[in-house]
Image (cartoon, grey):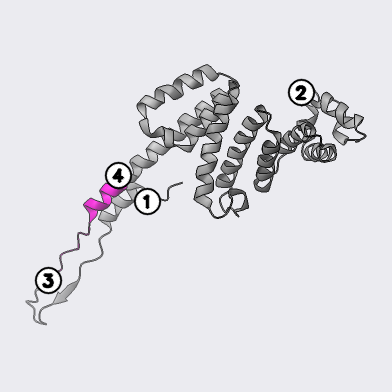
Amino acid sequence: MYNKIPMFLLLGLIFLIAPAAVSAADNGSGNTVAIAEPSRGNFEGDVADAAASMLEELSMIRRNKFFIGLNRLIEKGDIKKAEEILGKRDKDVPGQKSDEAYAIAKSKIAYAKGDYPAAYAEADGLLAAVEKAFAPQKPYEVAYKNKNERDSVAQVYILRYQALAGMHRHEEALADLNHTQRLVESPELFRAKTGILLWLGKYAEAAAAADRAYAMDKNIFAAMPDKERYCQILNGQGYKVKACAAPPAAAN
């Protein structure tokens, strides 16, 4: 977020001029009082800067509102409409292709359409820029002070993981989940790890991930569509997973 002084506060400074300096020319009854000219400062420049700052903040508010709405469309599955309004914004905001929110939206749309190479390209390009910004550290090695920044980086790793999994590049997909885990742990993360680890035949790790997901949120694993298949594989390999022994999640 921008830490700019709102314009109305800056304009208010005009009325807070320091008291004038008063001095007596002599001690007689006809003393003359000289009132110093107050310093005008650079108020015109300050106000112009504040106005520019306000316009920049308003632009950011509009941008955030647009991409929040777009993301809701994608989550609802209205991919065609999302693609249309993003394409229209391409004409209205030519510079948006350099916006990280644009790359995230493009990756999500491509993934929803089953175009995994395109989804990967968008996420991988964004991660390359993130890695460059944090070099020589890796983004998942950084001790973030800003939770939103940390969560945003984790989201980009998840986007690339999804695309890699869609292309059956499971080892690379698992690596991105491990990077994400160093940033943020969640039941959804461990549920995803369960599936990837099963694909790779790493049954002990898959069982541990399933139990971890279940321990964090019983419904996350119990309600997943692939639960029965996952449990059959794990049980067949001799692993007794708590999530598999639990009763099915209640329907909403």
Q: Secondary structure at mark 3?
A: strand
Sequence-wise, the earlier of marks 3 and 1 is 1
Q: Is residue 119 above or below residue 23?
A: above
In the rendered structure, find residue 5 and report the number of the disc placed on it.
1
- Residue type at tag 2: Pro
Q: Secondary structure at mark 1?
A: loop
Q: Which residue is mark 2?
A: 225
Q: Which residue is mark 3?
A: 34
The mark lying in front, picked from 4 and 2, is 2
- Residue type at tag 3: Ala
Sequence-wise, the earlier of marks 1 and 4 is 1
Please provide percent x and percent y for residue 240: 91, 35
Q: Which residue is mark 4?
A: 51
Report the span colored magenta. 35-50
In the image, 137 versus 8, the foreground residue is 137
Q: Secondary structure at mark 2?
A: loop
